[in-house]
Image (spheres, rainbow, N blue to C red):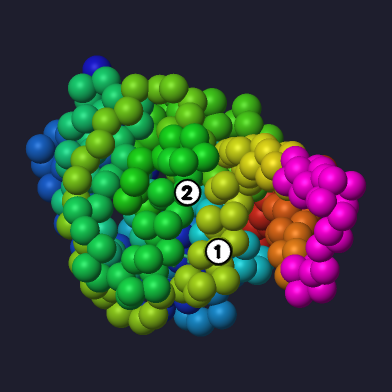
Amino acid sequence: MNTPRLAIIIPCFNEELCIEATVNQLLIVYNHLIKLNKINKDSYIYLIDDGSKDRTWEIIENLHKNNSHIKGQKFITNFGNQKAILAGLEAVRRIGCDCVVSIDADLQQDEWAIEKFVDKYMQGYDIVSGIRNDRKTDSFLKKFTAIMFYKTMNILGAKIPVNHSDYRLVSRKALDIMELYEERYLFLRGFFNEIGLKTAYVNFDVKPRMAGQSKFNFMSLMTLALNGITSYSIVPLRFVTILGFLMALFGVLVGLETVFEKVFLNNSPNGWATLVILLCVFGGIQLFCLGIIGEYVGQIFREVKHRPRYIVECELK
Ligand code: UDP
Ligand code: MG
């Protein structure tokens, strides 16, 4: 195999404090890999500004001016981290590359793992997923929600590697397959795992964020998780059906028992409290189930509108 042309994509949202240091650090890795002849000289870094309101784009433009191997594009507004990664993948496919690594702008992921990613690629793997060694740098809430998410996904039958957070290498072949998927809200962690290409895993250490704050809040994490679940599993819908069936069965049994008591024991149960409790419990379960169905209806609603996934304001090639 020839020395591959590697692209490194970085989604950035209000990262003025990190982005320059991150790019410089990645250039060290980049030069190291070129020296070892592991990647070729046309390799490049591609930054996607996800509608930042700070100086992020200005910094990217300056980086590009000084080094044509640093390219990028700017979204017209904030479309979210998944869309930014997706746009990066589509852009580098257009520009040309043999493989592409996505990494966060705060360099929390150990950038030296890229060398191992490329080694795996050279061994014939099309997808190399980075797996974090631990979650020491996460807050309690994030750790808890992340663990719950991966557990739920596993129970629901969607195969996503645990503790994988969009730090991965994918080959040109995987990018070509991605083009065939027209989903607006492609959940990348699920997608790359599902398409059945040869996959390797590389462990890496997580560092604290270089500067600034996490761009994810509780709501955006919930949205990501719900999208992951509703786009990769219909088990919750089955759960609703089974629950409905069990509740109906319970109702029939209670009904029969009541009739039995009235007819044979002449004992009509008086149960105002029971009635109120049952009403509330069943009412609650019904609304919860409607909510689950609503999530899927919402997913369909967003997809059928077929809106553009993102809108690019300008690009530096
Ligand atoms: N990010 C993005 N758009 C967003 C939110 C985040 O492009 O709406 C980028 C962000 O700039 C960073 C990456 O996604 O490069 C991961 O975000 P962050 O480090 O804030 O998340 P955390 O590490 O806390 O999960
Ligand atoms: Mg981070």
Q: Kindly identify which residue carries mark 2.
A: 152
Q: Secondary structure at mark 1?
A: helix
Q: Position of residue 229 (x, y in %)?
A: 57, 47
The secondary structure that dominates the magenta segment is helix
Residue positioned most to the front: 265
| Pick the front one: 250 or 112 | 250
Q: What range is drawn magenta here?
A: 249-275
Residue drawn 18% across the image and 32% down it: 119
Q: CA distance from mark 2 to mark 1?
A: 13 Å
Residue drawn 46% across the image and 73% down it: 215
Q: Kindly identify which residue carries mark 1.
A: 222
Q: Is residue 7 above or below residue 135?
A: above
Q: In this figure, what is the number of numbered marks? A: 2
The N terminus appears in which quarter of the rendering? top left
Q: Position of residue 168 (x, y in %)?
A: 34, 43
Amino acid identity at mark 1:
Met
| Pick the front one: 265 or 58 | 265
Residue drawn 44% across the image and 22% down it: 196
Q: Relative to residue 78, is residue 33 drawn left or right? A: left
What label sits on residue 241 in the rendered view? none
Q: Is residue 76 above or below residue 171?
A: below
Q: Is residue 249 above or below residue 133?
A: above
> Splitting the image into four quadrants, where does ligand 1 fall?
bottom left
Q: Position of residue 43 (x, y in %)?
A: 32, 41
Q: Relative to residue 249, is residue 39 drawn left or right? A: left
Amino acid identity at mark 2:
Thr
